[in-house]
Image (tube, coloured by chain):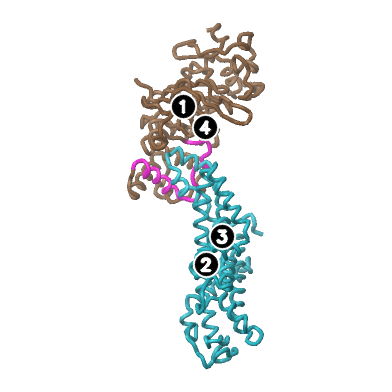
Chain colours: A brown, B cyan
Amino acid sequence: MEPLLAISGLCVDFHGYAGVARALDGIDLTIMPGEFLGLVGESGSGKSLTATAILGLLPRGSARIAGGSILFEGEELIGKPEKEYASLRGSKISMVFQEPMNALNPVFKIGRQMSEILRIHRRLPAGEARREAANWLSRVRIPHPERVLDLYPFELSGGMRQRVLLAMALSCGSRLLLADEPTTALDVTIQAQILRLMQETAQSLGTAVLLITHDLGVVAQTCKRVTVMYCGVIVETGPVHEVLHRPGHPYTQALLKALPRLENRQEHLQPITGSVPNLLALPSGCRFHPRCAAAGERCRRSRPKLVAVAAGHLVACWEARING
Amino acid sequence: MKRAPYYLYMMKRYPLTAAGAAIVLLVVLAAVCAPVLAPYDPLALHLPDRLQPPGPAYPLGTDEMGRDILSRVLYGARLSLLAGLGIVGLAAVGGMVIGSVSGFIGGRVELVTMRLMDIMLAFPSLVLALALSAALGPNFRNSIIAVAVVKIPVYVRLVRGLTLSIKERQFVKAARTFGASRAWIISRHILPNCLAPVIVQATLGIGEAILIAAALSFIGLGAQPPAPEWGAMVSMGRTYLLDQWWYATFPGVAIFITVIGFNLFGDGVRDILDPRLRG
């Protein structure tokens, strides 16, 4: 089967006074139709930037795609004329955001905002768009959809708003949903509800989901495959159970140790010491080596490539290669 | 919430605003009902009764052609209101278009537009309005256009500033991911969110707009006699000021009261719409 999205060797540069920062350095990523892929990493690792690049919405002026390709349904997206790109956004590729509080325009009612998208992409007349919007609200299990259409965003809770946004994102037949930390701003019970809802709705529509998060627990719940990013590069990718149970990269191992667990009654979580390096002064060799306990001489000198340690499980680490 | 008690409460809470609103209402009433309220045709000459002092026949006296000053002041409310609303309306719409587009696009477009606005703001409004009005040809309509153009930079700066902050908000970025075009984002997302501050600025600006329009007519670059325009009336009456004080005084008082009314009302609207300033 042909992948829905195939990113290869994607590089994104930021140009500024202090120099050129390569924020994404050779990203390879594939998503099959209907697949759930988790994209994990700490703040500043380039997760959201990858999503922004897929949508072609990198900040003009400062950011530039320096190389690589993004194939969506076999079509190259890089260099696509803005008009064609815009007609793709919201219809074939759509996005939900971290903060549902601010993602809706405060001055218009829900119904109007939902029908606007249907009118842009599906060219529905006003009355039909409203019916379709109500229909979508009930699909994301919002009670009394007719009444909710006439509410303003501030009258809804965070969870409700995220449902509305999910309905908006899926209502035009999206093939790929970019979910950028969709549950981070919600409390834990709502988080589980939204995740399950997203999973069920996307599955029933056959929509693929790129779930961006820093929470490995969320990934374990929802995704089949996971990709771990660090500092603009992919350090590990593979099936979720493989990566979570036999993590190959010291960074993934460290992330897992920083996760609270009920079963083994840890007193303290183990934080990863240090912080993400400055993109303008990247460490030589493996980008993780200054924070890595297992780093050796080779890690300081040259950068490891992604290598298979098991079927579909790739790790970019010199040590992992020796172990594996 | 019952209507009447609510208005009473607001009047108690904002007495000056209520006074301003009452004056504005009165002026609007005078303008709308001028044909009913005015005892005479504002343009009708009563040559035997020239320059009569206020009395039973002519409550506010007559001018040098025997025209009834009360009738002229009442009809004058129409012109002044039209000038005030027209100027502010044109300037606000123009400012919203220019400000939002230049703020949203940014870069060189914004730089050039904003420097142009700075240059316009560096002139005293009256001087610029005077020059424009003279260039367009002195009549009432052109004087409104001239003052509106002079007032545009105020709204451009306001809306551009708002646009810069609104375009960074998440819902604008979300709209981009839904495939909305730039024109769509400006008209559907940016402008509606600018509306409240623009309304405040416009309400505050009406008084000054009326004043500048009256000043242009006073100089002879606005409404032309015999139109019952307050500024023009003051101008004509000023030669008689020492002996026939009523001629220039009553239209002048009308300008004064109207401008005060709009200013008080505008201040109140700002206070009520901006919760941070609520005392």
Within-10-Å neighbours for mark 2: few <14, some 14–19, many 20+: many
Mark 3 or 2, which is nearer the eye?
2
Secondary structure of the residue carrying tag 3 is: helix
Three-letter residue code for mark 4: Glu
Q: Which residue is disc 3 drawn over?
A: B151
Subunit that carries the residue with mark 2:
B
Q: Is residue B146 left or right of residue B276?
A: left
The reply to whether label 4 and label 1 mark residues of one chain is: yes
Q: Do we see residue A155 in this rendering?
A: no
Q: CA distance from mark 2 to mark 4?
A: 56 Å
- Percent position (x, y) of residue B184? 43, 46
The quadrant in which residue B263 appears is bottom right
Mark 3 or 4, which is nearer the eye?
3
Do labels 3 and 1 touch, CB within 8 Å?
Answer: no
Q: CA distance from mark 3 to mark 1?
A: 57 Å
Residue lying at 43% horizontally and 42% vertically, measured from the top left: B181
Mark 3 or 1, which is nearer the eye?
3
In the rendered image, the vertical position of residue A67 relative to residue B266, given as above or below = above
In the rendered image, the vertical position of residue B190 relative to residue A168, given as above or below = below
What span is colored magenta in the figure? A96-122
Three-letter residue code for mark 2: Ser
Residue lying at 35% horizontally and 46% vertically, measured from the top left: A129
Subunit that carries the residue with mark 3:
B
Within-10-Å neighbours for mark 3: few <14, some 14–19, many 20+: many
Q: CA distance from mark 2 to mark 1?
A: 67 Å
Q: Which residue is disc 4 drawn over?
A: A181
Name the mark on residue B162.
none
The reply to whether label 2 and label 4 mark residues of one chain is: no
Q: Pick the residue in front: B22 or A70.
A: A70
In the rendered image, the vertical position of residue B93 relative to residue A305, given as above or below = below
Q: Which residue is disc 1 drawn over?
A: A222
Q: Which residue is disc 2 drawn over?
A: B143
